[in-house]
């Protein structure tokens, strides 16, 4: 909402100060900011008649506002968690599709990916919490994820395509953070290496999602019916579960 001065502010025993703004809407509309503050918009036309009533919030509206506030509070906590940088040290345990992180000390700096073990060797006097060291560790983890995803995801996609009778023209692994995957009109599938942050059943859900787009390009009823059939009837459950995850380390 734009930074405009409220027409009026009234205090509510439950929600505290509530700001009233003029709007082009035709009815009174309550809302909640990301910080959990309740506001109300009233129509410009006939505003005087509405102002006398808006302070009396009925119980049905209170229930709706409480639910919105709870959702906004949860959303804000998720955003803060995403914004908080990870801290890596010798005790860090990562859960990225079998990859393991091992940080040791030695007489020279080394980085290796041996099987599923990411080995990072620091000098004895290196401050592991220093920004440059933290950045280096993260970059090594990202590089290892890219190597593993390019090796594993195309094979997995091909197996699912054969299993369910899909055809596609190619697959690319990228660093996209805005989406887990995509499918072009030419049936070329793009997959983000950040998929490795998901549990394996959700990785498979994303792969099947993109394969379904080789048949149905939009998200219409036929697409979701197809997706649900290849997901054993659990497509909606998986879709909801996906909301818990973000493309960030």
Image (cartoon, grey):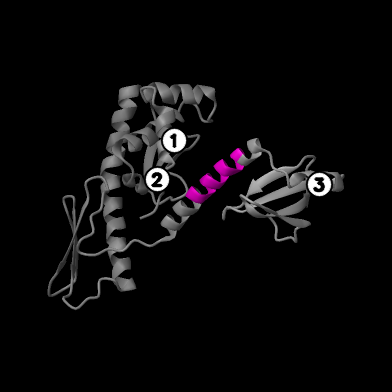
- Residue 170 lies, with reference to residue 145, above or below; the image says above
Pick the residue in front: 25 or 174: 25
Q: Which of the two labelled residues, at mark 3 and mark 1, occupies the earlier sequence position? A: 3
The location of residue 22, given as percent across then percent down, is 79, 51
Mark 1 falls on what kind of element?
helix
| Residue linked to disc 1 | 240
**Residue 190 appears anywhere in the view:** yes
**Label 2, label 1: how many angstroms apart (C-alpha)?**
10 Å
Q: Is residue 47 magenta?
A: no
Disc 3 is placed on an element classified as helix
Number of numbered discs present? 3
> What span is colored magenta in the figure?
63-74
35 displayed left or right of 169: right
Q: CA distance from mark 2 to mark 3?
A: 45 Å
Cα–Cα span, label 3 and label 1: 41 Å
Query: Where is residue 1 drawn, in percent x and y?
Result: 68, 54
* Image-quadrant location for residue 154: top left
* Residue 211 seen: no
Q: Which mark is residue 52?
A: 3
Disc marking residue 245 = 2
Q: In x, y percent, where is residue 152? A: 26, 41
């Amino acid at each position: 909402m734009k930074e405009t001065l409220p027409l009026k502010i009234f205090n509510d025993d439950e929600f505290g100060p509530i700001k009233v703004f003029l709007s082009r809407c035709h009815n009174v509309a309550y809302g909640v900011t990301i910080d959990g503050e309740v506001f109300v918009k009233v129509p410009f036309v006939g505003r005087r008649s509405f102002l006398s009533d808006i302070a009396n919030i009925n119980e049905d509206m209170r229930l709706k506002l409480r639910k919105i506030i709870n959702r906004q509070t949860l959303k804000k906590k998720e955003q803060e968690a995403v914004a908080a940088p990870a801290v890596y040290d010798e005790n860090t345990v990562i859960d990225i599709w079998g990859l393991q992180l091992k940080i040791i000390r030695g007489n020279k700096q080394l980085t290796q990916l041996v099987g599923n073990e990411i080995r990072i060797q620091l000098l004895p006097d290196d401050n592991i919490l220093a920004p440059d060291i933290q950045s280096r560790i993260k970059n090594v983890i990202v590089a290892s994820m890219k190597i593993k995803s390019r090796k594993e995801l195309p094979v997995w996609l091909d197996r699912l395509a054969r299993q369910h009778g899909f055809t596609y023209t190619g697959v690319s692994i990228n660093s996209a953070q805005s989406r887990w995957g995509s499918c072009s009109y030419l049936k070329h599938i793009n997959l983000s290496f950040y998929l490795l942050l998901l549990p394996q059943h959700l990785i498979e859900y994303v792969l099947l999602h993109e394969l379904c787009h080789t048949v149905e390009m939009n998200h219409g009823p036929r697409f979701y019916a197809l997706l649900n059939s290849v997901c054993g009837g659990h497509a909606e459950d998986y879709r909801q579960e996906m909301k818990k995850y973000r493309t960030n380390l």
